[in-house]
Image (tube, helix red, strand yellow):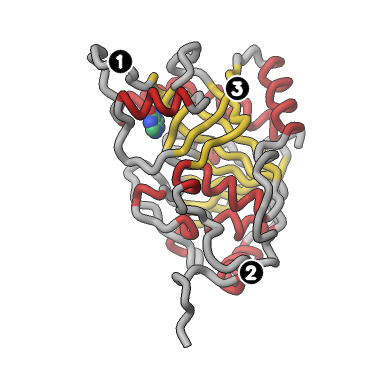
Amino acid sequence: MSSPVESSYTYEDYKKTADWLMATIEQKPKVAIICGSGLGGLADLLQNKTVLSYKEIPDFPQSTVHGHAGQLVFGELNGKFCVCMQGRFHFYEGYSCSKVTYPVRVFSLLGVETLIVTNAAGGLNSTFKVGDIMLIKDHINFPGMAGQSPLRGPNEERFGLRFPCMSDAYDQDLLRLAKQTAEKENCVLQEGVYCMVGGPTYETVAECRLLRTLGADAVGMSTVPEVVVARHCRLRVLGLSIITNMVVSDYNCTNHANHEEVLEAIERRAKDLQKLVSNLVSQI
Ligand code: HPA
C-alpha cells in the first residue's frame, strides 16, 4: 500500500550514498563545510584532495545555479580532514527541503561531528555595513514556521528525535572560538540573528521592516534547513554570513538589491572568510 504521506528519502538511501563515499575516499572527515554562493574558493585551500562531482555520487542532488561548481571536495584544511560542499542546494531552485539537506545526513553517516555553514545575506541591522562578516547566533526559520521543514514526515529515529530542540542550534564553544580566532587576525566580526526567507525575490520595503521588527539582523535564502537537519542528528554548527547588501527599508531609496552587488561583496570578503574558517578548523 502506498504511504499516506509524501515520499522522502529512507535511511537506506543516505546509507547507500555514504557507503559509496566511504569506499571512495581515503579518510573520513570530522568537519563538513557548506560553501555559500561565491565562497567555494575555500575548497581550493584543501591539500591532498579528492574531488567528486555531484553527478558521480549515487543519489546526490544536482546544483542548478550558475557559478556553483557542484562537487564534494575531501582533503586536509590546515591539517584537519574536511569535506567541502562546493555548490549548495536552495529551496528557491525548486528542491524539496529533504533534497536541500540530503548531504547533511550523508555527512553525519560519514562520521562528521561539526558543520560549518557560510552564506551571503542582506543586512537588516542598521549598524552593519556591506562586507561585514556576521557570526550567526540564532535563526528565524520562516519556511519552517510555515510548514516547510526538512523534518516534516515520519521521523527517522536513527538520525534523531521527533521534536528536536533548536534553542541551542549554534554551538557556543564554536562561537567563542570564532571570536578568538578573528581577534587574533584583526578581523572584525558582527554577531546576529539570520532570518531565512523562501526567495527568490528580494524583500519588499514592508517585508524588510517586518523582519527588523522581529529581531532579525540579516536575511537570506539558505542555510536554515541544513542547520535544522544537522542539529537533528546532533552535529555541532557554526554559521557565518557575509553581508552583501543593505536591505531597502525606505520607499525613497533608489538602491535596488541585485545579484551582481551580492557577488561583488562576496568577492571582496571571500579571502578573509576563508582565512578565518581555515584557522578555526585547525583548532576544532
Ligand atoms: N535578501 C535575501 N537574500 C539575500 C539578500 C537579501 O537582501 N542578500 C543576499 N542574499
Disc 2, SS: helix
> In the figure, 162 relative to 227: above or below?
below
In the rendered view, does 55 fall on the left or right side of 169?
left
Q: Amino acid at mark 3?
A: Glu
Q: Amino acid at mark 1?
A: Asp
- Residue 84 in view, yes or no: yes
In the rendered view, does 81 fall on the left or right side of 136?
right
Q: Nearer the viewer, mark 1 or mark 3?
A: 1
Q: Nearest the camera: 176 or 97?
A: 97
Q: Which residue is mark 2?
A: 19
- Quarter that holds the C terminus: top right
Q: Nearest the camera: 267 or 120?
A: 120
Q: Which residue is mark 3?
A: 191
In the rendered view, does 40 fall on the left or right side of 137?
left
At 50% from the left and 53% from the top, the residue drawn is: 149
Say if mark 2 contacts mark 1, CB within 8 Å.
no
Q: Is mark 3 within 8 Å of ligand 1?
A: no
Residue 280 image offset from top left, x and y in percent: 69, 30
Q: Nearest the camera: 74 or 30?
A: 30
- Lower sequence index among marks 2 and 1: 2
Residue 118 image offset from top left, x and y in percent: 53, 36
At 55% from the left and 56% from the top, the residue drawn is: 103
**Which picture quadrant has residue 205?**
top left
In the rendered view, does 16 fall on the left or right side of 183?
left
> In the figure, 238 relative to 62: above or below?
above
Q: Which residue is mark 1?
A: 250
Disc 1, SS: loop
Disc 3, SS: strand
Q: Nearest the camera: 279 or 37?
A: 37
